[in-house]
Image: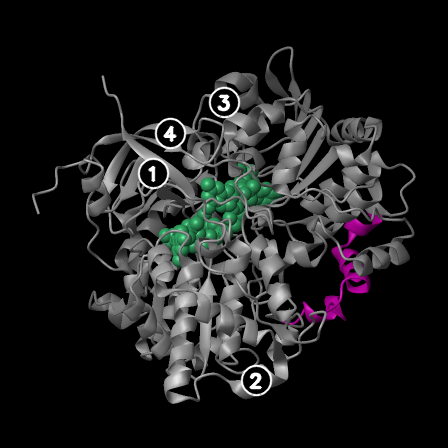
Amino acid sequence: MTKRRDVPGIRAYDGPAGGWGALRATALAVRQQMETIEAPIVLLRTNQPTGFDCPGCAWPDKEHRSTFQFCENGAKAVTWEATTKRVTPEFFESRTVSSLLALSDFELEDFGRLTHPMAYDAATDRFRPVTWDAAFARIGEVLRSLPSPDQAEFYTSGRASNEAAYLFQLFAREFGTNNFPDCSNMCHEATSVGLPQSIGIGKGTVSLADFDETELILSIGHNPGTNHPRMMGTLHEAARRKVPIIVFNPLRERALERFADPQNFLEMATCASTQIASTYRQVKAGGDAAALKGIMKGLLALEAAQGNVLDREFIATHTQGFDALAADLEATPWEDIEKQSGLAREELDEVAAAYAKSNATIVTYGMGITQHNTGTSNVRLIADLLLMRGNFGKPGAGICPLRGHSNVQGNRTVGITEKPSAAFLAGLEKEFGFKPPQAHGHDAVQAMQAMIDGKAKALICLGGNFAVALPDPALCCPAMKALDLSVHMGTKLNRTHLLVARETFVLPVLGRTELDVQQGVPQSITVEDSMSMVHASAGKLTPASEHLRSEPAIVAGMAHAAMPQSKVDWLGLVADYDRIRDRIERTVPGFEDFNERIRVPGGFRLPLPPTERRWTTPSGKAVFSVFPGVRENYEPWDDDVLRLITIRSHDQYNTTIYGMDDRYRGVFGRRDVLFMNPIDLETHGLEHGDLVDIETISTDRRLRLEKITVIEYGIAPGSVAAYYPEANVLVPLDYIDKECGTPSYKSIPVRILRSETA
Ligand SMILES: Nc1nc2c(c(=O)[nH]1)N[C@H]1C(S)=C(S)[C@@H](COP(=O)(O)OP(=O)(O)OC[C@H]3O[C@@H](n4cnc5c(=O)[nH]c(N)nc54)[C@H](O)[C@@H]3O)O[C@H]1N2
Ligand SMILES: Nc1nc2c(c(=O)[nH]1)N[C@H]1C(S)=C(S)[C@@H](COP(=O)(O)OP(=O)(O)OC[C@H]3O[C@@H](n4cnc5c(=O)[nH]c(N)nc54)[C@H](O)[C@@H]3O)O[C@H]1N2
Ligand SMILES: [Mo]
């Protein structure tokens, strides 16, 4: 091959993930955001029995076994929040909102923590300080003036505590709507919808202990080196025990190839590393359904050849629908499977053989599975695969969705859902004495659509960056400005806050790391991790400003002002969070003795019936489901159509950009790149470093991203990748998984054209 030309900021990264590079980056994050004396103390308190839950990710902690359990990206999340930089009323006084909108997402958040409640003043195009009481009173007034409560949307981003989220859903439901768009709708909704159909519950079934006993891990569509770094410790241990780890990912992700554990003294001292994936399958973007069917087809062939491959007894006792699945697998030609997955039959048969040998298998997965128009089917196919060998309810086996935000799972558990069950609503009615609305409400895309259509008039956000996280900003951003009211509870300024409505309030909240005192008594909140462990979290730092309020207190303040006749004693509830937890205990199953049990370090696990081979499906059995063919849901595009994946860099937390590097993928100081395979480069007549325009082809809207530098990368042919949120200009708002409503952020059909350069 000819020598690659030099492209600014693009250098191959040859080392393992983790290692000294991770420690250096941690030190840098601390230096950039915090005064150093306090920093190490804060980091030491992360995920400790007496500290706060890391706001980084939802991976659980290993019994607080090591003396410190922080990781590079956890440290970035903590220091980003605990920064000493401040956004004060004086800051806003000297800047118009229009001028702030011209800045990048990175610059906006990097100004630091919000210190005062602010209200938008259209006359001067500035935010002005407002008192909490005046803000609450006005928000309440506007909400009351809406002709229908369904004209309000209540958005939740998954960092909110159980207590804040519970009060938030109570507020909206007493107010009269089930409009609960939330980040989960853009994230693991396929899990929440698909898994209950298969196994009766929309949550993962494994615990950390299962990883100690597993014999095989299939890791599909997630990037733990960046997004769940503490999981790397677990994978590292498994790899060193010689547990095969089979990865399905279109991109070569360094942490899945090689990792040096910063907590492993010997590895650090000798600059050694551990190979993580025993097998790496570069499946095409959106090709997992085909790949999973290929593995299952291979398994059936093995069963026919040697027997004893399927867990016949489990299938007979615990499941239904196997025959239909088997018939469909028979009928699906290998040719289709190979074409859609981009993998050869032998490559999938090999995985089937490894699976047939393992007595306990775990499948882990993330956004590579869920953010597709077939996301829900993908999740059910993973369940099918596990059910075939009885991999539920035995040690070392099960399904492990890698959740997103640190408490997104908990938010769902305590009622943030646009489709509440009748039983939950009946429980609220009994407990609080108001009649909650029965009609289902809006999810995230539907809420935005209602705003675009002028049907929704008010948006209340418990955290997050709603407009930037959603697709198609050219369509969504103007809808924000057409609202009568927007309210944002946040720690830091972001673009969504600045897309001001007729009236907009930005309300600064206490972060996870900060001391939350109510009536003179320090409070703790609770969160639920990816493995359904609920535990307490108590911040210790002095708040960023004396004017901050806690999320529960702000939600209660708004609710109290909006509903003078409320049946809920809002101010009483926030005076002592134990009282909120008592209410959760009485209205949400699984929280018996809630207040006692969170006082035990480590907390407790919510019930997970599949771990006892109990299936809370309508039939009482686990269900095999069929994904017919592999071409279904695939639009008949030409062969030159590529699938665009939108991904996170190593230096970002969703829409929060910490820095401009993506170290493990060899990108430094920039984010304006498109990852492409050498073969695709060649067929497109392009070279590493050329400027290209990307155009979406599935929509009537013209969605384009121009002048992006295409770079050669180890990505599956037919797939290309670019960074989120910049690439959201290419994602159609209506290109969703119809079963769960999640945008297909990872399989956007695009065409690549050379830019017309001047
Ligand atoms: N530091 C940090 N931590 C985070 C976050 C963050 O932004 N930064 N975000 C949090 C949130 S909300 C979430 S949801 C999680 C996200 O965690 P991940 O699920 O790891 O999210 P992504 O970065 O979107 O990457 C998904 C991976 O899927 C692969 N992929 C893309 N398309 C496909 C496909 O079609 N098939 C397969 N098999 N793989 C595919 C990509 O190459 C990438 O490696 O992380 C959480 N933790
Ligand atoms: N193209 C593309 N789009 C995507 C994705 C993708 O992979 N590709 N991923 C999707 C996914 S998985 C998700 S989860 C969504 C994320 O969507 P969101 O959850 O809405 O977005 P975040 O970027 O996590 O929100 C960042 C903001 O949260 C606020 N914040 C931070 N900490 C706190 C806190 O403790 N309390 C409060 N009240 N506010 C706080 C800050 O103001 C910060 O600016 O994006 C989705 N969008
Ligand atoms: Mo997420």
Write down the residue under mark 2: 314
3D distance between C-alphas at marks 2 and 3: 58 Å
Badge number at residue 705: 4
Write down the residue under mark 3: 101
The reply to whether the magenta stretch includes residue 347 is: no
For discs 4 and 1, the disc positioned in front in the rendered view:
4
3D distance between C-alphas at marks 4 and 2: 51 Å
Q: Residue at x 42, y 48 (%)?
A: 76
Tell me the magenta residue range: 571-600
The reply to whether the magenta stretch includes residue 592 is: yes
Q: Is residue 543 visible?
A: no
Looking at the image, is mark 4 or mark 1 earlier in the sequence? 1
3D distance between C-alphas at marks 3 and 4: 19 Å
Q: Residue at x 43, y 46 (%)?
A: 747
- Compare residues 44 and 408 and report the one nearer the observer: 408
Q: Is residue 736 visible?
A: yes
